[in-house]
Image (tube, coloured by chain):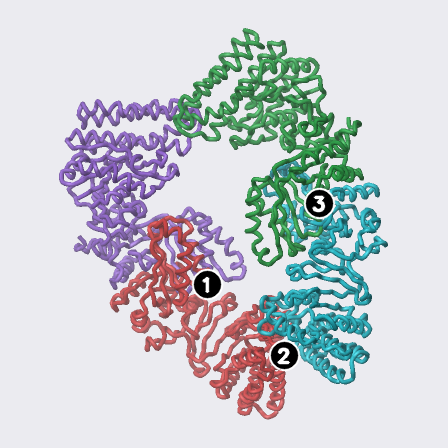
Chain colours: A purple, B red, C cyan, D green
Amino acid sequence: MRLVMKFGGTSVGSADAIRRVTEIVGGYARDHEVVVVVSAMNAPDLRTTDTLIAAAKAAAAGDGNATAQVTPRLLDLHMRVANELVTPEERAALEPEIRAMLDYMSDLSRSIAVLGELTPRALDLFSGLGERINARLIAAALRSAGIDAEAIDATELIVTDDRYGNASPIEPDTRERSRARLLPLLAAKRVPVVTGFIGATRAGVPTTLGRGGSDYTCAILGADLDADEVWFWKEVDGVLSANPKVVPEARTLPRLSYAEMGEMAYYGANVLHPKTVQPLVHRRIPIRIRNTFNPSHPGTLIDAEGDGESVRAITAIKGLSLITVGGPGMLGLTGVAARIFGAVARAGANVLLISQASSEQSVCFAVPGDEAAKVVNELRCELDREFAAHDVEHIGTIAPVVIVAVVGSGMRGTPGIAGRVFGALGAAGVNVIAIAQGSTENNISLVVSEADADKAVRAVHGAFVTTNGGNE
Amino acid sequence: MRLVMKFGGTSVGSADAIRRVTEIVGGYARDHEVVVVVSAMNAPDLRTTDTLIAAAKAAAAGDGNATAQVTPRLLDLHMRVANELVTPEERAALEPEIRAMLDYMSDLSRSIAVLGELTPRALDLFSGLGERINARLIAAALRSAGIDAEAIDATELIVTDDRYGNASPIEPDTRERSRARLLPLLAAKRVPVVTGFIGATRAGVPTTLGRGGSDYTCAILGADLDADEVWFWKEVDGVLSANPKVVPEARTLPRLSYAEMGEMAYYGANVLHPKTVQPLVHRRIPIRIRNTFNPSHPGTLIDAEGDGESVRAITAIKGLSLITVGGPGMLGLTGVAARIFGAVARAGANVLLISQASSEQSVCFAVPGDEAAKVVNELRCELDREFAAHDVEHIGTIAPVVIVAVVGSGMRGTPGIAGRVFGALGAAGVNVIAIAQGSTENNISLVVSEADADKAVRAVHGAFVTTNGGNE
Amino acid sequence: MRLVMKFGGTSVGSADAIRRVTEIVGGYARDHEVVVVVSAMNAPDLRTTDTLIAAAKAAAAGDGNATAQVTPRLLDLHMRVANELVTPEERAALEPEIRAMLDYMSDLSRSIAVLGELTPRALDLFSGLGERINARLIAAALRSAGIDAEAIDATELIVTDDRYGNASPIEPDTRERSRARLLPLLAAKRVPVVTGFIGATRAGVPTTLGRGGSDYTCAILGADLDADEVWFWKEVDGVLSANPKVVPEARTLPRLSYAEMGEMAYYGANVLHPKTVQPLVHRRIPIRIRNTFNPSHPGTLIDAEGDGESVRAITAIKGLSLITVGGPGMLGLTGVAARIFGAVARAGANVLLISQASSEQSVCFAVPGDEAAKVVNELRCELDREFAAHDVEHIGTIAPVVIVAVVGSGMRGTPGIAGRVFGALGAAGVNVIAIAQGSTENNISLVVSEADADKAVRAVHGAFVTTNGGNE
Amino acid sequence: MRLVMKFGGTSVGSADAIRRVTEIVGGYARDHEVVVVVSAMNAPDLRTTDTLIAAAKAAAAGDGNATAQVTPRLLDLHMRVANELVTPEERAALEPEIRAMLDYMSDLSRSIAVLGELTPRALDLFSGLGERINARLIAAALRSAGIDAEAIDATELIVTDDRYGNASPIEPDTRERSRARLLPLLAAKRVPVVTGFIGATRAGVPTTLGRGGSDYTCAILGADLDADEVWFWKEVDGVLSANPKVVPEARTLPRLSYAEMGEMAYYGANVLHPKTVQPLVHRRIPIRIRNTFNPSHPGTLIDAEGDGESVRAITAIKGLSLITVGGPGMLGLTGVAARIFGAVARAGANVLLISQASSEQSVCFAVPGDEAAKVVNELRCELDREFAAHDVEHIGTIAPVVIVAVVGSGMRGTPGIAGRVFGALGAAGVNVIAIAQGSTENNISLVVSEADADKAVRAVHGAFVTTNGGNE
């Protein structure tokens, strides 16, 4: 099996964590082809990338010695890990490499200080350093543990455009380069340890894919190498059925469909953004979310089918305002929806839910609470004439509200689910302000007042997930 | 009590019907101030206004004698009624008046034939003739029955702009003229019989308010005369809880709120369009729908409060397509809703329901089935680039679908209603494709396949209206 | 030789004039193929078309009898001519035809009065009547003088679009119909007498080419029949070298090029508008302007070559304002010309002359005096920011000014002409405010103050035309 | 008298030249307040600013040692001058200052090489170094010659916006700072030697006013210090009446008006761009152009009045194309000028002359020859429909052509000048293709073929300037 697996910041944040990584990788590398993607090291007291960016900004503000304090701490952070996990021979080779990279950083920061400005291009030179150091450290740790490994800069693999700070990969160049560089290593049973987050333009200038981009690096390589599975090692056992702070009995879901995962994108940090893993979804490559600190747990498997359970999870998006535009003249007024959402777009607000029932006399939609005032203002301007003609008579706001989303691809085509959802809510005395369920979505979204939110989440969770032991 | 009451086409469509009108008016005129608004006569075999318009079109096509066949039939239609209901003296005065109006029509049609074109202005001269004749006939019938009545052309009362064929009333002019002309009559216990449908510009050129405009005439006069109630006499006892062809046990609703009536605007001919009665809603004047042919029935009262029942009626809008636009890149794509509905507007389609649940990965909306192909086409053009970038991945259509709307202003704030609705649907095995419930709407709208539509209507009706005898 | 000739309003404005027409036509018809195009009759006290339009407007204002006074006068006008020029037999046939046309007019006007509006389509039915009557009268007069002639309505020949009141001919339809209808007559030595000014849509609805359209009719038929020459019979011997009121010694020019004629379009009524005769210019068909009342004079011949004289005529356009926009920042300001003339266009003003010399620091242009204030206002708005930045520093107006245009296609390529022009102006003490001479124009245009205008015209005329007897 | 005087690149390009500068400044400083503005040193074999920019670009391309070859040459260039003109003591102070500046340059270039990019901001740090070195050198030379002088960086005086590479001064800040810093020096009889070309943002970041900006620096300081006169020391005696290569007898003009100078902006390097000296024109401060190498010559005085001569100079702009757009439908076509020049602007072309004579049938304009094809292309697109309708029939190009401009503010209001101009051209057999003379311009512009250009210049020069000895 060909596995591409990524270890995030905390999973590579200490000697102990990295030892687990070597054990995990070592275990799988015996029988499988394994590619490892690593983030920069996030120790509890030293977040590498944040530290690098802060130093670059200090340099731009004129501090010619901006890195003086930082370099010894970064060197120390990584060498302390090396001292625990890396053989003396490897260490002897590693230390000067890390020092050279930190010297380069100092050089960069001095140059930025001389010129007095920090361009996005210069920042990208800086902000990928943590990944480069860490890939070398982890490769050395793997080798020290007897696993044949090689650190590789993704600048060799991932070709991007030149939007520094937010670059996009270019295909088929990336696929060609990745396969040419990595497949021979895999054939030779060697484990490539690839830097996340960074790439390079065709001209070779380093770029970054944006923060959080290590997941994206892993998905790109997984797709371009035609991996059998792609694993994201995190600090949790997998995706949960609800926020455990609200629902103590929330469970880890064994399996989800891509579509269900998409529905849960707002749920929290442990869910992958659907855009990030799009390369994998396109090639139907199964994804797993696993726990570095509990590697025996099978985690959550995410693939095209899921397991067909009806309701899988209940999420809540807080801090919203529900805006309603209505009036007798809206009935049959062609183009009014376009004008309303045009006004919303001018206000720069994201629309999180829309509901217009059949009477066409009003439309309501949810936006982040702090954008509501601007949206209402734009709507008043846009609909000025309709107000004067009494075609539109009210633009109202209900806030704070929460969207409670009930997710599950098995809901479609299963009569009675909505009845159970609303039955549970009714029994709990929750007043539902608005409802939206789209035709292809694996999702019923309810708008409730913030005061009712937790009660609503618990009620639906109780009706489906908790009681329904057979979910697993 | 000051009552403004309108009798529609079938209610004034025969000698028998008009006799009922005289009885009804006579009954109320004894103790109340009554203003009567009348449509043109719609006999089963001779629809007056349609006949007039057809003659005008024939004239424009060159038929100089377009009215030759029509005038004797129209004269006969009205004089036959007069023979039954009008005294010989009145008849002697009425006949030359009708003849003069029909001669004028012949004159108009000859002129149109000479010039070879039919302008909207000329058509308005034509198409209000039926109301003018009928107002005179009914006034004569009332007088013959001993009720002091006077026919009045609304061109004297309702001042409009000059958008011929689709004119709008101008206030405060209309209010001033209506009160100056009608209040003295009411004070003298005389019943004004006013032509529906027509008005005149400030310069005195006749206009029409558009077809179905008699209801609007009645609402304008009701508001401008500060009526205590405004009654629309129709051929049914009132507003029904469902289509009786689908739900045999459908009941007449005794009372509705304005808002509930608005929700039911699509339901059928017996419901008043909310825009038409807007002048009455503004002044909070109660409306009654009553049955000319069953005048002892109290009908349906429509006012600001309604009676607070939760679910009142279940309606269905058939022949729709549900269009879904989705893809992973839609999440957080500001302005995409505006662009989608802009494309829909360019396609000229009305949007009858929108639902975008919280995942923001897709939005679905319903449009009339015959407009779906054009909408999809416009969407493909609009989202071309997003398709290429895989941000949008599918634009799908489900058809034929039906929107089932569950209406009732008491639904808001009553936990458990949605649960009962969806519970009933689940029990009936109805698969709900999409759901929308807006925040201020007294309405939950469900999209179901056309095959499920009647079953869905019956299921919800059964759960609320039928079983819930206490509704009344 | 195939000749198409048009007789304008005054040339067919009396029995005496029409007798001359019959003599002229008779003279040429003996040896040539002749097509005659006629306007409506313009008698000194009765301008036919104006009278018809006035009657139509009176009808629209409600005068049902608008034509009562007009029809006997028009009948009398035409029959008095007939009495002098037409044989009793022809007259017996002509009179009922004219009466029928006048009856139709009365019918139209009654219909317009009944409907109370005058549409462009209805006006076109009206306003071509004068041509139709006159073509029949003149054809009868020609036959009475022994010339085989036939009146033909141009509605049979000229196919137009349906922009009533301002229709454009459609080719090749017009060419096909004209040749099919007229060539057999010419082959049979018969003279077609065609109505000017009117055409008909493909559906046969009469249209007009706009007032002054008889010249256009003549040019269309001349081109479509491949005439050898096209003659416009007027009340003057030909085109003059200057306005004789200003320059008593102004002379009739024997020959002009099309281009020179184009340059003189502003000169006055006796010059043909270049757009009107475009069909003839395209096919390089020679044009003659001749005098109905002095038929022995050869008139002015207008063709592709002209006679190569350098200066041909001096014209003056009065009542103008010269507007100058300038400032140091205009040098090298790309797009400023577009913005200036964009502002002029928004002000709705025609630009009669532009001059921007090489320093690019200012541009000046002439507009009609009554449009200057609006133009300056638009310019101030458009250039607001440039004013603030001192890039533009002044927008000035000089008024009243006159453009004196010195016309002659021989000027190009003849060194010394400009020297003589400006030498003559200098000698006369005329201060030249601005100068423009375009590269392909047969024209030097000078801007002078209104006080200097006549002096300038006389000075240049004296230097070239008067002294240069060899011009003729 | 308060004098602000600027010495350009060649005037400060060698020890010999700078000795002359010290003599000139010394001579005037005795009796006047003198402010000196200096450019970077332009030695025949080492153009300082160009050299600096080349080094910066080499650094950005990765050459970490880009300045290694340049610094010794620049040090040598300046110190060789110092060896001749500066006392040993001054030299001892000067050399380390220059070295420090060159070290800073090396530092900058290394930083640019490290970061691999050259931003406009970084370039501005670089490109003003030559002025900073030179101001110090010249101040030292002045002091060595016994004149109390002080080098001042204009970054202390001229406050600009932050458009690096093309910054604009901000008032009144610049006025305040300049007066506060310089007036005390002048009061103390000390000569400030100010760097041209550079300024600084409010935050103190160095900027440049763009190349050639030293003239602008001088004009800004002249205006802000309320100078009595502002002198520009160049390598010629003053402004010439024509290009001496074409007209050997061309003379230096003793006096010009600001307006005349503006007309001659295209004439060549020795004329000041009107935008550059705008601050002086605004305050009506007289300008002198003088010859560093012939300081006894009075030069050319430029002020508001000039000396009123009619024709002052004849200039020629070569390498142009004359484009003509014409057709019969352009007559009266509102907005066509705006559309034509809109198309020209889209093609990015500057319009150097426009002429549209009164017939409105065509407009012609001159553009640089290498832009003509693109302009014609844009015009064809813009006027596509008019071509199809034969309203526009030709878009022609005549090339190569030359604009000959006859400049002189006395031409306006002097009848006969144009006559003499065109008389001379006619006598010389020059064919004038187009003419433009704007109303406020002190300029007649003629378009002639390139073959005729020199002949035309000589003919007009001969007729006015040469023969007219009284010009002086």
Query: Of the residues tagged 1 and 2, which is closer to the observer?
Result: 2
For label 2, the residue is B114
User: Label 1, label 3: how many angstroms apart (C-alpha)?
Assistant: 61 Å
Disc 1 marks a residue whose amino acid type is Gly
SS for tag 1?
A: loop
Q: Picture quarter containing residue D285?
A: top right
Question: How many numbered marks appear?
Answer: 3
Name the residue: 21% across, 49% down: A253
What residue type is disc 2 on? Val
Q: Measuring from the top left, give residue A83's x and y in whole percent.
A: 20, 25
For this rendering, which residue is in front, B105 or C221? Answer: C221
Pointer 3 indicates a residue of which chain?
C
Q: Does residue D464 appear left or right of residue D267 in this picture?
A: right
Q: CA distance from mark 3 to mark 2?
A: 62 Å
Quarter-of-image position of residue D313: top right
Which residue, given by chain and number where applicable, does mark 1 sit on?
B348
